[in-house]
Image (spheres, rainbow, N blue to C red):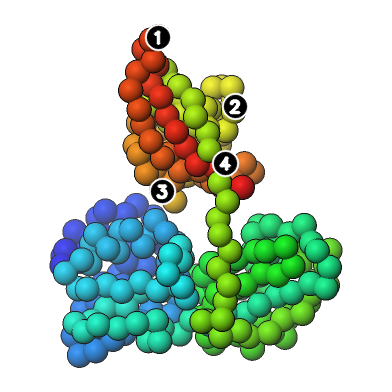
Amino acid sequence: MIEKKNLLQQVACDEDKILLSRLYDLARGARGGWKPSVFFLDPGKCRKIRLWFGDCEPVLWGGYQGAERCMVSFGEEAADGTWFPVSAVEVTSSVAWEVSHRDVLGALMNLGIDRSKTGDILVTEHSATVFCESALVDFLLQEIKTIGRYSVKTREIAIDQVKIPEKKFREVTDTVASLRADCVIAAIYSLPRGKAQEAIRSGRVTVNWEELTSLSAELCTGDVISLRGLGRAELDEIGGLSRKGRTYIKAKRLL
């Protein structure tokens, strides 16, 4: 495992240093059994945990296979999701609603809930499922009354009863002058290049869940891009050159 001093040198902000210090101590103390975190990590930090703590056998769990936001546990033996204090709260409306992930997250933030205490939020036509730390369930059941302009009801639902909605994507195919971030983002989101550059400069773009700060950074196959207000996309494929020397790209834009 990477030395603690070297690990902390790889992050810039104090908040990340505190988080990684906590995880390091958790990993070092897991020799005698499983010690799960009681907070969720965003997908970018989950990637780093697999890299930095690979020899500590990290297990990440967010309530279902493929969850993006996960808790982490360290240990020397196999474990499954039952080790983690992860629960699910279902929020339902009696009418079809026009509610987004952002609406549900906003309702949670308005209740003063720390984002690290909630995992993925899955939204369908009539309901939303919020994965959360188990200790938070009673609070959510009592306090969530509305989402946006809709009155809602809540109930705890067994993890294995949660129906995971299929993600829907729109395929985008285009050519770009180069794989510079501003070029690729402009193509994926159908923006003028100047607008893409403005979005990057204003801190509205993340790549692999980290803020993009360089207009000229080259993007790679598999990169996950998020442009605030316009959603998420994944750079699915980088092809050859067109007759005019432009590079073919294919992306999946989340609907």
In the rendered structure, find residue 171 and report the number of the disc placed on it. Answer: none
Q: Quote the CA–CA distance across marks 1 and 2.
A: 21 Å
Q: Report which residue position mark 3 lands on.
A: 208
The residue mark sitting in front, 1 or 2, is 1
Residue 102's place in the image compared with 232, above or below, is below
Q: Which residue is mark 4?
A: 170
Q: Can you tell which of label 2 and label 4 is closer to the viewer? A: 4
Q: Is residue 165 visible?
A: yes
- The mark lying in front, picked from 3 and 1, is 1
Residue at which label 1 appears:
244
Q: Tell me the SS state at disc 2.
A: loop
**Is residue 32 placed above or below 15 in the rendered structure?**
below
C-alpha gap between disc 3 and disc 1:
30 Å
The residue drawn where x is 27% and y is 63% is 50
Say which amino acid is labelled 4.
Arg
Q: Is residue 215 visible?
A: no
Mark 2 — residue? Answer: 191
* Residue mark closest to the camera, 4 vs 3: 4
Instruction: State the image quarter where residue 221 is shown.
Output: top left
Instruction: Count residues near mark 4 (Cα–Cα under 10 Å), then give few for <14, some for 14-19, many for 20+.
Output: few
Q: Earlier in the sequence, mark 2 or mark 3?
A: 2
Labelled pair 4, 1 in contact (Cβ < 8 Å): no
Give the alpha-carbon distance from disc 4 to disc 3, as whole Å: 19 Å
